[in-house]
Amino acid sequence: MSSFAGWKGGPRAALTGFYGLAFLAGLGLVLWLAALVSGMQASQGIRGGFGFLSEPAGFQIPEALFPVGPSDSYLLVILAGLGNTLLVAALAIPLAVALGTAVALLRLFGSRPLAWLATAYVELFRNTPVLLQLFLWYGLLLLLPPIRQAFDPLPGVLISNRGLIVPALAQGGAWLALTAATVLALLLLRKRVTEGQRFWLSALAILPLAALAILPRPELEFGALRGLAVSGGWSLSPELAALTLGLILFHGAYIAEVVRAAILAVPMGQVEAARSLGLANGAIARLVVAPGAGRIALPPLANQFLALIKNSSLAVAIGYPDLVAVINTAINQTGQAIEGSALALGIYLALGLCVAGAVNLYHRRSSYGALTADPTERLGERLARSPVTPATPLARGLSGFSYAVLALAGLWLAKWALWDAVWLGPAQLCADGAGACWAVLAEKRGLILFGTMPGQAHIRAVIGIGLLLAAVSLIAARGLPLAWRAALAVLLALVAPLLVQGQTFGLSPVPVTSWGGVFVTLLLAVFSIGLAIPLALPLAVARRAATPLLRVPATFVIEAIRGVPLVLLLFVTASLLPLILGGLAVEKMWLVLAALVLHGAATLAEVWRGALAAVPPGQAEGAASMGLTRWQGFRLVVWPQALRIALPPTVGTIIGAVKDTSLVLVIGVFDVLGAAKAALADTLWRPYALEVYLAVAAFYFAICFPLSAYAERMRSGSSFNR
C-alpha cells in the first residue's frame, strides 16, 4: 500500500508521470492545431511563412511618421503602423499622468466643489467604455467649423474639423537627438563625479554640446491658412486628435485613482520625521510625499501605460492606421493569419517587457527603499481622522466662486437637457430647437434596443433581457445555497438565447445575424463572465504549480492573451477559429464570445493567482496537519481566503468585461454601441450623435457604477473585513 505524504496526494513518480502525460497531451494538441491550420491555408492556396513581409503591400498609410506607399513592403508598412502606435503613446502617456495627478490632488486637497467635480470625472470616465468615448470625441471634432473658420485660441494653433494644427520645431529631429544626447551626457557626468572616478573620462560626455555650432538654429513653424490648405506647423488629423484625447481622458481617470491611493499610502512616520527636521510643508510634499507616492504608484502606473498602449489599437474603429489596423489589413490581403498574429503578439509582448524593464530598473536604482514596509500609520489614516481646519477668507471666497460656477453650469446643463429639449418629433423640430434632441432615441429605439430583429421577436428579446438580469440577480442574492442559485442562474441564462432564437420552443426562427442592441450586449457580458470563471481557476492554480510542465504553459497562455489588445484577439479569433474547425461556418456572435471568454479567463486567472499567493503558507500546512487532502485543504481553507482577498479586483475585472463587450463592434457584431452607430447612419439624425452616445453611456454607467461602488465598499468597509 503506497504511502501519501501530506500534500503530495500520491507517489512522486506517479505525480510526475501524470504531469508528463498532461504536458505531452497539450503539446500534441498544439502541434495538431498548427498542422490543421497549415493544411487549411494550403488548401486555400496560402503559402505559410513570413516571406510575405518582403512583398509589396499594395496599400498606403495616409498618416505616418515617414511616407509609405503601395510599392513599399509589408514590413515597412507595419513599421509605419508601429510608429503611429508609439506616437499615440508618447503623446497620451505624459498628458494622462499630468491630468491624473492634478485630479488626484483636487480630490484630496481641493475645495469641496472641485473635489466633487474631480470625483464625477473619475467615476464617469471609468465606468463607460473607452471605444464609446472615442466615438464621442471623434463625432464632436467633426462638428467643428471648417478650416476656413477655424478657431485660433493661440498663435499658430488652429482647431477645425480637419483636426489640430500646432507649431512645429524646424530641424526638430536633429534637436531632439541633441537634447537626448545632452541629457545622457549630464547623467553620465553626475555618475562619474558622485562615484569619485577620473574626471577626464567624463569630459567625453560634453562632446554632444559641440553640435550646437553645427546644427542650424531651431525655429518654430506656425501653421497658416493658404486657401483651403494649411502650410507650416504640425497637423494632427481628427482621427489622431480624437484617439489621443480619448486615451488621455480615459486613462487619466484611472491614473488619478492610482496617484490618490499612493499619496494616502505614504507612511505618516516619514512625514513626522521631516517635520522634526524643520522642513516646511512644501518641502515635505516635494522631498518626502512625492517620492514615496511615486514609488508606490509606479507598478500600477506601469499597468496603465501598458493598457493605454493596447487601447491605442482602437484606432482601427475610427480610421487611424495604427499597428493593429495595418496588421489586420495585411492578414485580410494575404491570409497569413498565424504569421500576422504571431508578429503582433511578439511586438506587444516586447513593448510590455520594455515597460516592465524600465519599472524594474527604477526600483533597483531608487534610494527610497522599503517604504511600503513601514508599519507606522499611513497619511490617509491621519487625514481621515484629522479635524477640519478653518478655511481662510481667500479659501472661502474661492470655494464660493466654485459653487457659483458649478451652479451656473448645472443650470445650463438642465436647460439644455430638460427644459429646451425635444423629446418627440421629426428631425426638423430638433434643428429648430435650442436644446438636446432626445427625439432621436424615440425614433431609433427599436434599432438600439433590438438591432435588426423582426418586430414579432421584440417581446422575446425583452423576456430574454429579463432572464439574463434575473440570472445575475440570483448569483448576488442570498437565501438559497450557492450551488442551487448557480444552477438556476445557468438555466435562466441558457433559456434566454434559445427563446430569442425560437426554434427550440416551436417559434418562428430568428437568425443570430439579426440579433443586436441591448440584448446582445447583456448576452455577451453574462456568458463571457460565466464561462471565464471556470477556466480562470485552473489557469491560476497551474501557474502557481511547482512543476514547470504546468507552470510554463499556463504562464504562456495567460501572458500571451493579456499581452495583446482585445481588439486584436477578436480579429485573430475570427480568422483562426474557422480554420481550426475545418472551414465550418460559425456565427460571428460565437466567435467574439470565444475571444471575450479567453480574455476574461486570462485576466481573472492573474487576479486569482495573486490572491492565492497572498494566502499565508501556514494555512495550507495547517490544513495538511489536520489530515485534509490536497483538494479538501484547497476547497475549505485556501480558496475561501483567496476569494476574500480577490473579490474587489474580481468585481473590477467583471466591470472591465462588461465594457469590453463594446469592442465587438469592430468585427461587425451588432451590440448596443453598434446599433447606436447604425442609428446615426441616417443623415437626418446624424447631427445628434451626442445625444445617442450619451444615452449609451448612461446604459453602461447604470451597470458599471453600482458594481464599482460595491467593489470600493468591499475594499474599505468593515463588513468586508469581517
Image: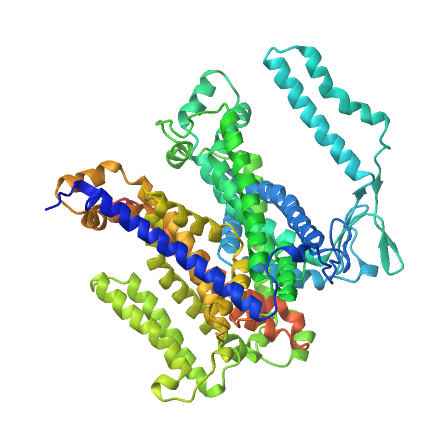
x, y percentage for residue 276? Answer: 45, 17
User: Residue at horizontal 65%, vertical 23%?
Assistant: 187
Q: Which coloring applies here?
A: rainbow
User: Residue at horizontal 45%, vertical 88%?
Assistant: 456
x, y percentage for residue 442? Answer: 55, 78
x, y percentage for residue 420? Answer: 61, 70
Q: Is residue 664 visible?
A: no
Residue sitting farthest toward the right: 227
Q: Is residue 264 left or right of residue 11?
A: right
Q: Which quarter of the rendered picture does the C terminus lie within?
A: top left
Please, is residue 514 above or below residue 559 in the view?
A: below
Viewer-side residue, 508 vs 204: 204
Viewer-side residue, 154 vs 86: 86
Please, is residue 375 above or below residue 424 in the view?
A: above
Please, is residue 278 above or below residue 229 in the view?
A: above
Q: Is residue 263 visible?
A: yes
Q: Is residue 639 left or right of residue 150?
A: left
Viewer-side residue, 287 vs 337: 337
Q: Is residue 211 left or right of residue 360?
A: right
Figure label count: 0
User: Residue at horizontal 43%, vertical 19%?
Assistant: 273
x, y percentage for residue 636? Answer: 20, 49
Q: Is residue 490 left or right of residue 348?
A: left
Viewer-side residue, 445 vs 676: 676
